[in-house]
Image (cartoon, rainbow, N blue to C red):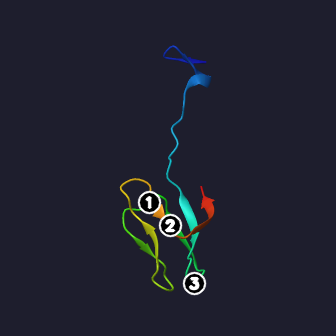
Amino acid sequence: MVIAGIPRRKILIPEPRSKFLVVVCPNCGNRQVVFSHATFPVRCLSCGEILVKPTGGKAKILGTIERVLG
């Protein structure tokens, strides 16, 4: 199948670059889900330690990334 003169297999589908992450707090070990492009500082819900600092694009992750959630 050809759409507007471009073969179908050549059409690129954009995918988001941002992801949700499970981050482990370096202070207490609590696990928390955060956004990779957070716009506000994210604090640990248990001890209040800052886990994520916004930088204007990708956020700086200060905890340990345990896994990526899609």
* Three-letter code for the amino acid on which mark 3 is drawn: Cys
Residue 28 image label: 3
Density class for disc 1 (Cα within 10 Å; few <14, some 14-19, many ≥20) is many
Can you say which quadrant of the picture contains the C terminus? bottom right
* Three-letter code for the amino acid on which mark 2 is drawn: Val
Residue 59 image label: 1
The secondary structure type at the circle numbered 3 is loop
Residue 32 image label: none
The secondary structure type at the circle numbered 2 is strand
Which residue reaches farthest bottom?
47
Q: Quadrant of residue 40?
A: bottom left
Which tag, 2 or 3, sits closer to the chain's start? Answer: 3
Q: How far apart are labels 2 and 3 at the CA level?
A: 16 Å
Q: Residue at x 49, y 79 (%)?
A: 44
Please tell me how many numbered marks the rendered image carries: 3
Which tag, 1 or 3, sits closer to the chain's start? Answer: 3
Residue 58 x, y percent position in the rendering: 44, 55
List the residue tagged with mark 2.
34
Density class for disc 2 (Cα within 10 Å; few <14, some 14-19, many ≥20) is many
Q: Nearer the viewer, residue 27 or 35?
A: 27
Q: Residue at x 57, y 84 (%)?
A: 28
> Looking at the image, do the residues carrying marks 2 and 1 touch, with CB atoms under 8 Å apart?
yes
Where 36 sits versus 1, above or below?
below
Residue 38 x, y percent position in the rendering: 42, 62
Q: How far apart are labels 2 and 1 at the CA level?
A: 10 Å
Mark nearer the viewer, 2 or 3: 3
Q: Residue at x 55, y 76 (%)?
A: 25
Q: Quadrant of residue 29?
A: bottom right
